[in-house]
Amino acid sequence: MWQGILTIVIIFLIIILPQAIRVVREYERGVIFRLGRLIGAKGPGLFFLIPIVDKMVKIDLRVVTLDVPRQEMMTRDNVPVTVDAVVYFRVVNPEDAVCKVENYMRATSLISQTTLRSVVGQSELDDLLAHRDKINQQLQAIIDEQTEPWGIKVTTVEVRDVILPEGMRRAMARQAETERERRAKVINAEGEYQAAQRLAEAAAILSEHPASIQLRFLQTLSDIASEHTATVVMPIPIDLLAPLLKKESTK
């Protein structure tokens, strides 16, 4: 008789103990319900549940990477774009994540998609391309505010890719090329202007010191003479011929 009772007890323990003993990892929390009433969140570690009476839901507290699918939308300046993003969030209140929303992963994904469409639709294309950090901060603030009642903390939102129509890309390429040509012409004109200024200053200095013209002339001849195949034709200064011209005029 005692052997039968002992056997029943052993069988009962084998069936009940696995349901009563729970182990929660360091990055998890167990939200416990007793007869449908919320008891609280436990963990990490080993603890016991009352079989049949207690139910537990495990919640992962690690950062979750959520891909926001590509969304086709119109910007504020009526440019069609396709945008996708990535959202990083984690559960900070396991009880709210279980009790206040049916599926916090799906809810966060949907709210991220609608927020992305809304923010991009209110932004111009130039802001979306050049000021992406501002768009990311705006997305993060809006999504975090809406998911906070669910025990969710959104840490980062990044717009991953902005796809433009082929015609718009060609137009932007032509615009960039035209802008580069304009800058090249401005730089060339600025160089010509500075060169003209320096030549004017040099001419003013040479006019004040006529001897410097002769020195510059001799320097030029020295530079030409460095070429072995060069033929130099030296003009005779008129000052050297002036005495001869005077003699001829007196005769």
Image: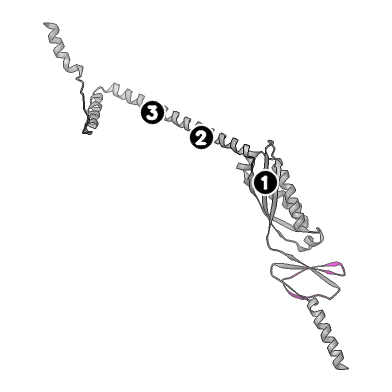
Which is nearer the N-term, disc 1 or disc 2? 1
Which is nearer the N-term, disc 1 or disc 3? 1
Residue 2: image quadrant is: bottom right
Overall secondary structure of the magenta section? strand
Residue 107: x, y in percent?
A: 77, 55
Residue drawn where x is 86% and y is 67% of the image: 37
Do the CB atoms of the residues marked 3 and 2 lie less than 8 Å apart?
Answer: no
Residue drawn where x is 71% and y is 64% of the image: 61
Residue 6: x, y in percent?
A: 84, 90
- Towards the viewer: 177 or 54: 177
Q: Which mark is residue 83?
A: 1
Left or right: where 195 falls relative to 106: left
Judge whether residue 193 is colored magenta: no
Residue drawn where x is 53% and y is 32% of the image: 178
Left or right: where 158 falls relative to 213: right
- Label 3 belongs to which residue? 195
Callout 1 secondary element: strand
Which is nearer the N-term, disc 3 or disc 2? 2
Looking at the rendered structure, the kind of residue marked 2 is Arg
Callout 2 secondary element: helix
Judge whether residue 38 is colored magenta: yes
- Label 2 belongs to which residue? 180
Left or right: where 238 falls relative to 129: left
Looking at the rendered structure, the kind of residue marked 1 is Val
Q: Quadrant of the N terminus?
A: bottom right
Give the residues in magenta. 31-49
**Residue density around tag 1, few if under 14, some if 14–19, many if 20 or more, within 10 Å:** many
